[in-house]
Amino acid sequence: MKRSNVKKVLIANRGEIAVRILRACKDLGIQTVAVHSTADAEAMHVRLADESVCIGPPQPRESYLNIPSIISAACVSGADAIHPGFGFLSENSTFSHMVEEHGLIFIGPKADHIAMMGDKIMAKKTFARLGLPTVPGSDGAVTNVNKALKMADEMGYPVLIKAAGGGGGRGMKVARSRSEFTEAYETARQEAGISFGNNQVYLEKYLTAPRHIEFQIIADQFGNAVHLGERDCSLQRRNQKVWEEAVSLVLTPKFRDVFGGKIAEAVGRLGYSGAGTLEFLYENGELYFIEMNTRIQVEHPITEVITGIDIVREQILIAGGNKLSLTQNDVTFKGHAIECRINAENSETFIPSAGTINNYHCPGGPGVRVDSALYDGCKVPPYYDSLISKLIVHANDREQCLARLRRALREYVIDGVDTLIPLHMRLANNPDIIAGNFDIHFLERLHENK
Ligand code: ADP
């Protein structure tokens, strides 16, 4: 069995991803330390960890974003590594730097790669230089409204104004025509400054009917990098993913091999280490890079079930200084997988819902995996992201996968809060989804036409 140099991991997160990381640690024989806010004292990640430390009050900035508290918890508990999960501090290069300054291992890429990819302008430039196609747009930041307008006229409308520091589907404004441009530009700059502390914006051609396709990569500290294929995450609401599939219906195996190979080579040349995801938009048979996420993604399980590779385990081993345990030839893709994000939100209005779960029944059976931190009687606090569970279904082909998904959704009972289960049920029965006809605007169109 592969041994890890890491002996005790502090998990700087909550909810299902904290439980997911904890499970990978247990499988590797690694001790776990949970951190939690006062609102999460009874949470599942706290119950399953070997030790736990309360790091502050419910508000994220006082607990899960509180760097001194988290680093102190790691030092006091004798952890030798910190896994940041996703969200919270996962893409904060200052945090990863401070973790290393304290002699702890940050389970993720190096701070300078996090910073580089956190600036979306820099990320695009970097991968363009490394030979990947990017969405056409301005060459870097635009700072002058008249120059920006001229550039938009040349590109042709619609044009998208994006924040260099944007994330989570926020920080984007579409200008559908010349008359909309100036206002969209000014609003985008202002909002970017307020939300991300960086008012740099850039322009991109707004693609009207693309798919969102992303490639998972893993790379070690010795320049070895492999790709684990792609995920189609086109079903989104307000630019946030709701349903993901692997593999995508539009890439051929040949295309996947060749393009995935190019990506792995680029990532290897960059000297990147850890897990990462390169996001692309797909239109007219071409993929165009938009950004890279330097952390584990919410939707990583669909890649795990079709490849049989435990990505979180690989993250921990890589951070501990191990070489990649596989080569590109070891990576094969079996069947089809779909993940439904079960958010505690109203299925019609998407308004978040908090409360106590008073009846919980989790689906099971062939091909069903549920990543959640829910249990009968647990609380869904109002302070955090509304993702409470992920239903992941796997089968030999997409048709069987959809049948299993419908079966699992019917079995799933979560009483006490609103959830997206009814929405997923509608999607799993929708003729266009069944036929694979969708792009990134599908969900919004569906909502408007109701
Ligand atoms: P974030 O970092 O906020 O997730 P991304 O750049 O990854 O931002 O974009 C999020 C989503 O916004 C994409 O999945 C896609 O649906 C939409 N989007 C981004 N860029 C474009 C574009 N140039 N044209 C059309 N849609 C886009």
Image (cartoon, rainbow, N blue to C red):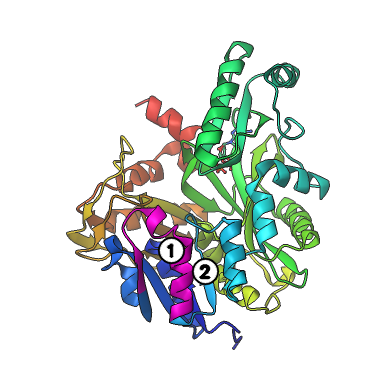
Q: Quadrant of ligand 1?
A: top right
Q: Residue 83 got which mark?
A: 2
Quadrant of the image occupied by residue 197:
top right
Say whether residue 295 is visible. no
- Which amino acid, mark 2? His
Residue 309 position, x and y percent, is 58, 71
Q: Nearer the viewer, residue 204 or 75?
A: 75
Say whether residue 8 is visible. yes
Q: Nearer the viewer, residue 62 or 159?
A: 62
Q: In the displayed structure, would residue 138 be above or below residue 429?
A: above
* Residue highlighted by disc 1: 13
Q: Are marks 2 and 1 in contact (CB under 8 Å)?
A: yes
Distance from the alpha carbon under mark 2 to that under mark 1:
8 Å
Q: Which residues are magenta?
A: 53-76
Q: Quadrant of the C terminus?
A: top left
* Residue name at image x 52 percent, y 69 percent: 83
Q: Quadrant of the N terminus?
A: bottom right
* Residue name at image x 32 percent, y 51 percent: 383
Magenta highlight on residue 58:
yes
Q: Categorize mark 2 by other alpha carbons within 10 Å: few (<14), some (14-19), many (20+).
A: many
Q: In the displayed structure, would residue 362 be above or below residue 247?
A: below
Q: Earlier in the sequence, mark 2 or mark 1?
A: 1
Residue 74 position, x and y percent, is 47, 75
Residue 20 position, x and y percent, is 44, 68
